[in-house]
Amino acid sequence: MIEIKELHKSFGDKLVLDNLSTKFSEGKINLIIGRSGSGKTVAIKSMLGLHDIDSGGIFFDERNFSIMNDVERKNIRKEIGMVFQGGALFDSMTIEDNLSVPLIMFSKKSKSEIRDRINFCLDRVNLVNVNKLFPSDLSGGMQKRVAIARAIVLNPKYLFCDEPNSGLDPYTATVIDELLKEITYEYNITTVINTHDMNSVMQIGDHIIFIKEGKKIWEGNKEQIMDTDNKDLNDFVFSSELFKRLKKNTN
């Protein structure tokens, strides 16, 4: 479980996170939603230690990440997998070499053990015979699956995803959503996803927080979001005609 308590973060005079508190449970898809500039990405980067917070606390299974030194934080980061918005694969490296990077950096596995683990993770995301290919040889959806495979290669307890469906067609986005859900449930991972994708919200949102101007405005799940009377949330989620009709048909 990850718990954030009364987070405050400013850049200059601009308050970006304003007393943000919530809990992200293991074995669940936890979504952070909100308009561009609402503070979603800053929240995730703060949890990863990429931004120093002004006040508050970030706890990984009751371990206060906020007050740890660099060595202690490195130990926590070994338990974290990350899927970046664009995949962030190394273009000049093969798929196998991309997956080997965290294993070489953070594990003591032998070359054969590394190869076995890479093959296992690629198989888990339904990719075969891609080890010696380069990212440019793969479709966008396949690249995202490689990014997920790399994120789970160290058996993480925590998985962070920044807009994992960005740039994907609706069908492929659904495939990625289902894959993230399967992996989360199968390995009991605490998964935190920053997303604009309302299909993801409706399909895999076990726990959802809606942020506006750095504040948590609403918290619930994919079933509760259909019945909310929160105007800010409704204006955001049901802004399209399709989702307006969906909400109308469920009421």
Image (spheres, rainbow, N blue to C red):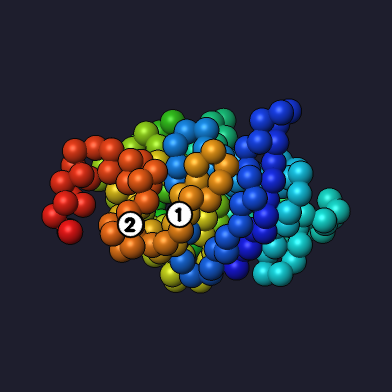
Secondary structure category for the residue under label 2: loop
Horizontal side of residue 184 vs 247, given as left or right:
right
Residue on which disc 1 sits: 218
**Tag 1: residue type?**
Trp
Where residue 154 appears, as percent x and y from the top left, is 61, 60
> Nearest the camera: 154 or 227?
227
Seen in the picture, residue 116 relative to 238 is either above or below; the reply is below
84 sits to left or right of 165: right
Mark nearer the N terminus (1 vs 2): 1
Which residue does the numbered mark 2 point to in the structure image? 228
Q: Residue at x 44, y 71 (%)?
A: 186
Residue located 56% across and 30% down the image: 92
* Residue at x 55%, y 63% (from the top left corner): 24
The percent position of residue 226, horizontal first and vertical second, equals 28, 57
Seen in the picture, residue 1 relative to 57 is either above or below; the reply is below
Q: Quadrant of residue 220?
A: bottom left
Nearest to the observer: residue 217 or residue 116: 217
